[in-house]
Image (tube, grey):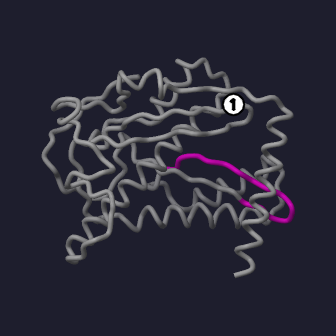
Amino acid sequence: MKSFAGSTSKAASIKFRMPTRESLIPIRLDLDVDGHRYKDAFTWNPDDPDSEVLTFAKRTVKDLKLPPTFVTQISQSIQSQLAEFRSYGGQDMYIREKIVPLKVDLRVNNTVIRDSFLWDISNFESDPEEFARTLCNDLDVADPEVAPAIAVSIREQLFEIAAQSVSAVREAKLGKKGRRTYDLSKGGNNALDVSKYFGSKGSGVIRKRKDWYMNGPTVDILSNEEVGTLDELNSRLKRKLDEKEDSF
């Protein structure tokens, strides 16, 4: 995997942003309307005009021949996720040279890929998309949809960590204690100091040598029958969850 230069180990207060080269945010859609289901995951530039959301929704519905009611559902879901990301804008977060464990466990079409690795969240030049492409090339993954799915999964985890950092700073300012979060200005159980384990300079992605064999990436290719069975099980589970939500 490509390494990226780390930053200094001194904690620094910065304004909220994704800890990556490009501040792309993960968007995940799972919509069931009028007996039709639409699932997708992709990244979105939060600086793009909001009018692009409706344009994207209309184009998606047209290309996939979905019912027109999906236009509103897709637009609202994307706008909701954009609003959540933007709600952190301008707020303080603490970042210093640390690494956190990330995990990928995905099924994309017929491909199942699993991996775990350490990510340097202080490195704002890290690139989830480049990492995902390199991983797929190394593993000879042929499906072109797998790499983007991996990048989205990584960005979802990094977004959660960054958001928790904002919450930790906010609580510290309010003098609240006792809530366990990813406090990126101090050492914690969920993050490790790069300087302690890997020296003063970290890399964007790290895999401990002793873990290469035990925790290396794995890829499985499912048959069409296996995919059909999993899709049916997932659909049943989603229907049950939806029924429970409707009952409240």
Disc 1 secondary structure class? strand
Where residue 84 appears, as percent x and y from the top left, is 47, 66
Quadrant for residue 80, please give it.
Answer: bottom right
Q: Residue at the far left: name it.
A: 10
Structural crowding at the residue carrying mark 1, measured as other residues with C-alpha within 10 Å and reported as few (<14), some (14–19) or many (≥20): some
Residue range corresponding to the magenta coloring: 31-44
Question: Quadrant of the rendered structure where residue 9 is?
Answer: top left
Instruction: Report the front residue among 48 and 96.
Output: 96
Query: Is the magenta region chiefly helix, strand or loop?
Result: strand
Question: Where is mark 1, residue-wise?
Answer: 111
Q: Give the vertical position of 145 relative to 209 (above or below).
A: below
Q: Residue drawn 27% across and 58% down?
A: 183
Q: Residue at x 84, y 60 (%)?
A: 67
Instruction: Look at 79% across and 56% down and name the residue there.
Output: 37
Q: Is residue 69 above or below residue 204?
A: below
Residue 50 vertical position relative to residue 190 in the rendered view, above or below: below
Q: Measuring from the top left, give residue 58's x and y in whole percent.
A: 72, 56
Q: Tag 1: residue type?
A: Thr
Is 136 magenta? The answer is no
Magenta span includes 38: yes
Q: Position of residue 193 (x, y in %)?
A: 22, 41
For the C terminus, the image quarter is: bottom right
Give the quarter of the figure containing the N terminus.
Answer: top left
Horizontal side, residue 156 vs residue 7: left or right:
right
Residue 244 point in image, percent of width and height: 73, 73
Depth order, front residue of 173/71 = 173
**For this view, does 9 lie left or right of residue 43?**
left
Which residue is pictured at 44% across the width and 55% down the height?
A: 47
Q: Quadrant of residue 236?
A: bottom right
